Amino acid sequence: MAAKNQKPSEGMTVREAGRKGGQTVKQRYGSEFYERIGRKGGEATKHSHGHEFYENIGKLGGKKGGEATRNRYGPKFYETIGQIGGQKVKKLIEEGKKASKKT
């Protein structure tokens, strides 16, 4: 099997080809297309694996993902992204207040 970054004869990597194809689909069908096919896939998975499947992957995936992020970036990372998120919310609230005063 070819490596992911190996270039085909045209000189494009698999990643570049995938990105180009994704952009073409998005232009042709719109971003809602991805929402529709994602929802259909989710429904099919629910029918074949049951509701509990999502509960289990949510419990395991969230824990594993959180542990991996903590191990990669350290606990301080969560504090930093929390502060950034809080600042963003504060800014949005201020903008909302300004917009409501104008009307």
Image (cartoon, rainbow, N blue to C red):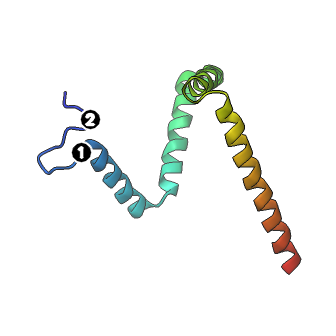
Name which quarter of the figure residue 52 lies in.
top right
Whether residue 103 appears in this view of the structure is no
Q: Amino acid at mark 1?
A: Thr
Q: Closer to the camera, 87 or 40?
A: 87
Residue 80 placement, left or right of 8? right
Residue 75 placement, left or right of 35? right
Question: Does the CB distance between marks 2 and 1 fall below 8 Å?
Answer: yes
The residue lying at 68 percent from left, 40 percent from top is 80
Residue 101: x, y in percent? 88, 76
The residue lying at 14 percent from left, 51 percent from top is 10
From the image, tell me which residue sits under label 2. Answer: 4
Whether residue 79 appears in this view of the structure is yes
Q: Amino acid at mark 2?
A: Lys
Q: Can you say which quadrant of the picture contains the N terminus? A: top left
Q: Closer to the camera, 62 or 87?
A: 87
Residue 37: x, y in percent? 48, 45
Few, some or many residues within 10 Å of mark 1 (<14, 14–19, 20+):
some
Q: Outermost residue, right direction?
A: 101
Residue 86: x, y in percent? 76, 48
